[in-house]
Image (cartoon, rainbow, N blue to C red):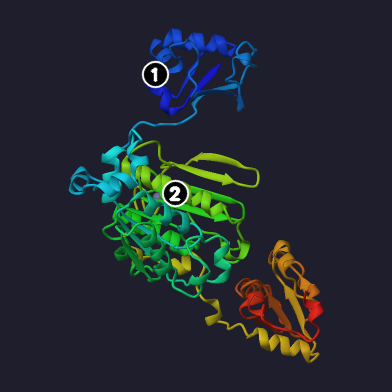
Amino acid sequence: MKVYISATLRSFFGRRTETETQGNTIRKILKDLTDRYPEASKGLYGDDGNLRGFIRIFVDDEDRTDKSFHDDEIADGSTVLLLPFIAGGAPGESIIPDERRKEVSLDDSEIDRFSKHLLLREIGVKGQKRIKAARVCIIGAGALGSPVIQYLAAAGVGTLKIVDSDSVTPENLQSQVIHGTRDVKRPKAASARDTVRNINRNIDVTADNTRVEADNVMSVIEGFDLVIDCTDNYKTRYLLNDACILSRIPLVYAAVYQYEGQVSIFGLKGGPCLRCIYPEPPAPGLVPTCAEGGTISPLSGIVGSIQAVEALKLIIGIGENLGGRLLTVDTLGLKSKFLNVSRNEHCPLCGNSPSIYEPEGFNYEEFCGLMKEEEEIPVEGYTAEELAEKIESGEPVTVIDVREPHERAVKSFPGASVIPIGQLVRRMNELDPEHDTVFICKQGLRSILAIHTLREAGYKGPMYNLKGGMDAMKDIIFSNEAGWL
Ligand SMILES: [Zn+2]
């Protein structure tokens, strides 16, 4: 029978991750283990001879810690796991050098404010000084940025830079809890900076309205100890990954979509980068973006909070971080998984013979399929008002909705035929090439892709795009209003 030993207990078992045992019940397995590793009995048992309260024993994912299970026979081929309830973790190496830590001091008000950290053996004054000395750059002040920025500010990170080029919109408020109703239309970076100042006046916080591009990404992150990826698009993710690997700055990565999230850390010694795990992004339009696909409100709170914890662990130098592991969280089934991820020796960025040496030498638009094809063959389109006018005046227009079923449930376009983008070519014969056809989606981007796809497949009829998609229709009032509800 194989017994797996959680990292924090390994010191008792000669640093083994697993060991073979002869026992076929928990009682016999524990006896065998403590006979062979006498050190382990100190770790596993308290003075009263009982298993210590922080240790759990799992057999095939079932908690069998309770004594009543200890004589049950365990089936051959089962997995037994010894897991401490609170994973303390062996101290890692802090990304903040000792000299920097020694340069800062904590005054009385800070001792007060951070007393809950100072009480933690692993943090203490030294750890808190490292937090204060840390310089963290957060890219994106949206859904993930909201918990990351607020927790890092509350935890006492001394220097924060918040980079975001967008402004707050009402639909942001469902998940971007760093902004409030009165911040609508304000730049997100400035709104987030004001929240940080409200949390702790002593933080050196900068709001940067810059859009991160290949020609500025290196200077945006320069001088920081850590970068946190709280963005929502593939291009910026690869840009940040490349810039961080090339600048040797660790990157705490996370992404959320609908009910699922993932978190990892790139750029740690020997660990992988984003390109090792995902050598290329999905083609544009094939996977709806977070803005198009939606997310449940607290998901980014959960995932972003994990990013904040990972950031603090790297800064203090404690615990087991997510380097080399990708954590996935599914909030619908409330399940999480750790996937081991490793460096790819053929990675064009961090592999053995890299081909990317600077972000400026790489075409991110082409890589992410963002080349504006409409420059070659322009797609004609209607504004929401123009389309509404055509429909009101009774002109014959065929409207094709290429959105996914769950998106149409939010608001459907009456009279539209529904053909999800993946079925368009197969169902081309349903279109009438003698009449105008207008393609609609949520934001007017996938509909352009739909038109390109049909053109390539040889469709010859006149095709138009609804500019701005259904989002742009939201203020349109039709005379037959009931038809739109
Ligand atoms: Zn790589």
Q: Is residue 287 visible?
A: yes
Q: Is residue 60 visible?
A: no
Could you say where residue 72 lies in the image, as x and y percent from the top left?
Answer: 65, 13
Q: Quadrant of residue 465?
A: bottom right
Could you say where residue 106 lies in the image, as x and y percent from the top left?
Answer: 24, 47
Ligand 1 under 8 Å from disc 2 Cβ: no
The quadrant of the rendering that contains the C terminus is bottom right
Could you say where residue 360 lies in the image, as x and y percent from the top left?
Answer: 34, 67
Residue 17 versus residue 135: which sits nearer the camera? 135
In screen coordinates, is 342 left or right of 25?
left
Q: Three-letter amino acid code at disc 1?
A: Phe
Question: Which residue is tagged 2?
Answer: 307
Question: Which residue is tagged 1?
Answer: 12
As helix, strand or loop, the secondary structure at mark 1 comes to helix
In screen coordinates, is 207 left or right of 71?
left
Q: Earlier in the sequence, mark 1 or mark 2?
A: 1
Total marks placed: 2
Could you say where residue 327 lies in the image, as x and y percent from the top left?
Answer: 51, 43
As helix, strand or loop, the secondary structure at mark 2 comes to helix
